[in-house]
Every structure is written in structure tokens, then in C-alpha cells.
Image: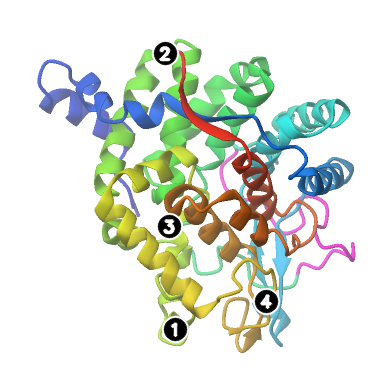
Amino acid sequence: MKTNRPIVWIAVMLMACLPLGGVAGAAESVDRYVWQTPRVSGIDREKVAPLLEELEFLVQQVLDAGPLAPLRTAYADIPFEAYYLYYERGRMITTLAWAYPHVAPTRQEGIRRYVRNLLADEQQAPWTPGILQKNQGAERRLYGRPVAEGRYVTYDKRAVPTLHVLYGLWLYGDRTGDWQIIQQNWDKIRGHYTRSAATEVFLYGQMSAHVAMARMAQRFGDAATLQIATAALAADLEAGRDTGVIEQRQRKTRYAWAYDERNAWAFAGQPWMFLDAAPEVLRFIADNPSTRQQALQRIDAIKGVYPLWWLHQAPYFTRWTGDEGIGTPPDLFGMVYAVERWVRQVPAAELALYMRSAPTGIGDCYWMEGLVQTIEAHGQLRWAPLTR
């Protein structure tokens, strides 16, 4: 069942309907989000020294482990109801790309090698259709013993949004300068985007793929993909002015279980839509007063249920990981932190307080990305233009 308009169809319609400039006219409305990216300078290294030390340790854990399997969380009394995260192929690339500028040269070299190995492995590469299976990769939990019991994210056959991983490819190239490996695989990346965007549900997180594809297409001289991606972004951002529209899309995805009568009380605000959103998309939300207000209302609602949202496995009663479960998994941190950082724009000192918790196992993407963004919040942020 199709759940989102094909991006090629969007591009054709926009070119037909817009005056003179065609897709270029639509692109003008998204230039701010495609052609500007956050750059940070002057980080107070003394203030963030403990955070940098933690980041070095966590990155080394990932490098030592190799490709990682999805993270299993099980905080209830029925093992079958375990809850899985980080099942997207190539998801770790985004996290390591964020970390890259802040780790030692030896670990930077390790990150480049790690990512190149992932891209050479069709099981792990982000353009391979589908999601990682339970046993594809190393165990993330610190006890080290693989446990695969528990229903997987596709047990109810609803859509699993994954295209946000393409933003990680652009971020990796941007932060490392290792564009060669991205360009070598451009045909695979473009083909995956074109095929998947025709059917995948686009929440705010998946809109990040349009940003990434436009930028990579520009770099690699692919004018057609550049037009398609900017037109698709324009359409999705327009829809995204109303979080209610994105919530209707959300109900067609794996997050539909959170709306069940027995579950909905635990997920006030239903802010899954903000998971995996790039800073550029969150900037769009912040730029539009009504959208910003709606986003903050959703986040404040779930914070009202889980005041210690930043504390992984906080012992709240919830149905998150199973019937009568106790504890919250990392995606609570992922959806709230992103909005606090880029939409509410809380001060660096407050962001640092959220890092008093600890990641869940090896390669906890949401927590590690929050750690990096907290480090960068201790510098001067500017939205810098990218070369077109």
C-alpha cells in the first residue's frame, strides 16, 4: 500500500504547475534548509572535557564491536514483548559522522575504515532494502550474550520509516571529506531513494533524506535528482507546517501501536515524528511560529508523563517495551532531545544536565548524538552556506 506520493510525481507536478521557474521556484522556498547547515566554532574545551572523554570511549566501543545488531530492550515480564531500536541499515553512520570532528585522529581513521566496511557489506549498507534482522551484527547490550527473543518491528506489517539514514551519508562526507566512497556508490544511493521515497511514510525525520539527496546530487552533478529532492522537500515541509498532518502519516507506520486504547495514555503528544530529524528540518519547525508551538506542546505533553525523560530506563510504569513494563527506552531521549536542542534552543548548560544519564549498551545512537550536540552547543553556532 502506498503511503506517500512518489517523489518523481511530485517533481513532475511542480514543474508543470509553478510559473517560469518550475521546480526552481519551489526550491527557492527551501533554500534556507537545503543550502545552509550548522557550523560550530570556539567550543569551550575545558567545560566539555568530561563529555569529550565519554565520547572517545563510546566511539571506541563501536569500533571494537564492528557492525551492530539492533538494540533489544525488554523491561516487562514477557520476554516475547521485547522492543527493538536501531534496526535501520547504516544507522550507525549518522552517529559516527556526528562524532568524527571531536575524537582523536586514530579514532577518526577508525571511523573512516568502519564506514567503508559497512558500505562494502550489502547486509549493512543503507541502500539495501529492508531492515536488519535480530542477529545481523554484534550484540549491543553490555552483557554480550545475544538474545533474539521478542517480536520484531515488522510483526504487524506496518510501515517502518528508514530513509533518514541517507542524511548520515551526507553528514559523513561533509565531516570527514571522504566523498570518494559516497560518489562510488551514488547510483545505488539514488536508486534506493527513488524507489523507497515512492512508498515510504515521510515524518520529519525522513524529510532529512531530501536535504541530503539534494546536497549530494549537487556535489555529484546530478541535476535531475537535485530537482526531484528539492521539490519533494518543498512539498513535505509545506505539509509539515501542521504537525497534525504528519501525525496522520505517523498513524500508518509502526508507531500506530502507540495509539491502541491500552497504550495511548503512555504516549502523550505522540511525538515519534521528531525522531531522526536533521537540524535543518528542526530549524524549519523553529522558524514557523505555529509549527513551533505545536511541536513544543507535543514534547511538553510527553515530558509531563516522563519528567526524567533524559534518564534511560527510568523506572516509570509504561507499556513501552511490553505489557506492564517498567522503564523507558532510548527513543524517548531521541525525540525529546532533538526538539529541546534545535526548536526550544535551550542553553548549553541545560543540555549538559541531560547527559547525567548513560547510554543503553554499545552504539546507542540517540544518546551519542545528543552527547555530540551538547558538546557543540558549548561553541558558537552559525548557519553557514554550502556551495551550490
Picture residue at 57% right of the left edge, 65% below the top? 332
Q: Give the label on residue 388, or none.
A: 2
Picture residue at 62% right of the left edge, 21% below the top? 182
Name the N-terminal-most of marks 1 and 4. 1
Give amino acid for label 2: Arg
Q: CA distance from mark 1 to mark 2?
A: 47 Å
Residue 206 visible within the image = yes
Give the image location of residue 239, x and y in percent: 25, 48
Name the N-terminal-most of marks 4 and 2. 4
- The residue to which callout 1 is attached is 265
Tell whether label 3 touches label 1 (CB within 8 Å).
no
Name the N-terminal-most of marks 2 and 3. 3
Tell whether label 4 touches label 1 (CB within 8 Å).
no
**Residue 53 found in image quarter:** top right
Residue 95 shown in magenta: no
Looking at the rendering, the stretch of residues picked out in magenta corresponds to 128-148
Q: Quadrant of the N terminus?
A: bottom left
Please name which of the two marks, 1 or 4, marks the residue nearer to the observer: 4
Q: Is residue 357 left or right of residue 308?
A: right
- The residue to which callout 3 is attached is 273
Q: Give the camera-side residue of 55 and 185.
A: 55
Give the image location of residue 32, x and y in percent: 35, 29
- The kind of secondary structure the magenta stretch mainly shows is loop
Spot the residue most to the top: 221
